[in-house]
Image (cartoon, grey):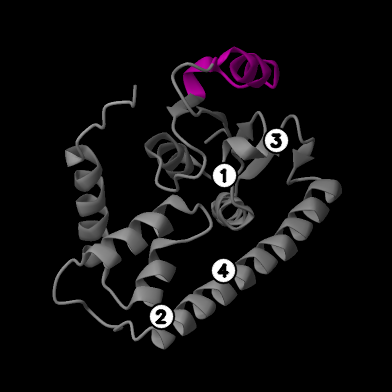
Amino acid sequence: MASRSYGYSRISTSAQDWTLQLEALERAGVDDRDVFRETASGAKRDRDQLRRVLDLLRSGDRLVVYRLDRLARSQLHLLQIIEEVEDRGATLVSLKDNIDTTTATGRMLIGMLAVLAEFERNLILERSAAGRAVAKKNAVRFGRPPKLTTALVRQVTLAHEDASSTVAETCQMLGISRSSYYAALRAGRQALTDRPEVAPAV
């Protein structure tokens, strides 16, 4: 089977324009029918179109992006995506960053990224450990909570908004299951929806 070039293009809001990215991908030899377009924040890890294009990659294929920040905001998440691309036998090309993982320069830059991602991961672990220490000092109970408390909902909501925090790390830090994590997240969003609007002062 002949190798193919796939493109991934992302904008954060529908008010932004695709043109710059799509024209660059076309000039790089990506057929418009093989470009996956997504409207989502780069901090969001679970993105439908990104997942679709990654699942399509086979040995010899290329994944082409306008810039690396179209894939991820976190260095750790970006490295995880690159590793998945390479595990599938494909290569990654970032046009504006002049990165091609088939070249020596590209491999060197990916190696540097791996070092930075490890540094980022260590910072996350240190922050999690510090959070646990503060929680213990304040007599916060770890383990599965008997119910969704206001404090738990707030902690989960704040952690979810932090692009550098993963679900697994938050669950470990708070001592909760994934189901409790998402239940708390839903409760937090519902609370925002139910919050009454405050009339501006006159």
Quickly name the residue at label 2: 135
Q: Amino acid at mark 3?
A: Ser
Q: Amino acid at mark 4?
A: Ile
Q: Amino acid at mark 2?
A: Ala
Label 4: element kind:
helix
Residue 177 % position (x, y): 26, 71
Mark 4 and mark 3: span between their CA atoms? Answer: 27 Å
Mark 1–mark 3 contact, CB under 8 Å?
no
Residue 22 % position (x, y): 59, 17
Specify which label sits upstream in the sequence, 1 or 4. Answer: 1
Q: Quadrant of residue 156?
A: bottom left
Specify which label sits upstream in the sequence, 1 or 3. Answer: 1
Quickly name the residue at label 4: 124
Magenta-drawn stretch, dominant element (helix, strand or loop): helix
Quickly name the residue at label 3: 94
Q: Nearer the viewer, residue 10 or 134?
A: 134
Q: Is residue 189 left or right of residue 79?
A: left
* Region of the chain picked out in magenta, as a range: 17-34
Mark 4 vs mark 2: in front: 2
**Residue at image location 45% in from the left, 28% down from the top:** 38
Specify which label sits upstream in the sequence, 2 or 1. Answer: 1
Specify which label sits upstream in the sequence, 3 or 2. Answer: 3
Mark 4 vs mark 3: in front: 4
Mark 2 and mark 1: span between their CA atoms? Answer: 31 Å
User: What label sits on residue 72 in the rendered view?
Assistant: 1
**Residue at image location 20% in from the left, 76% down from the top:** 145
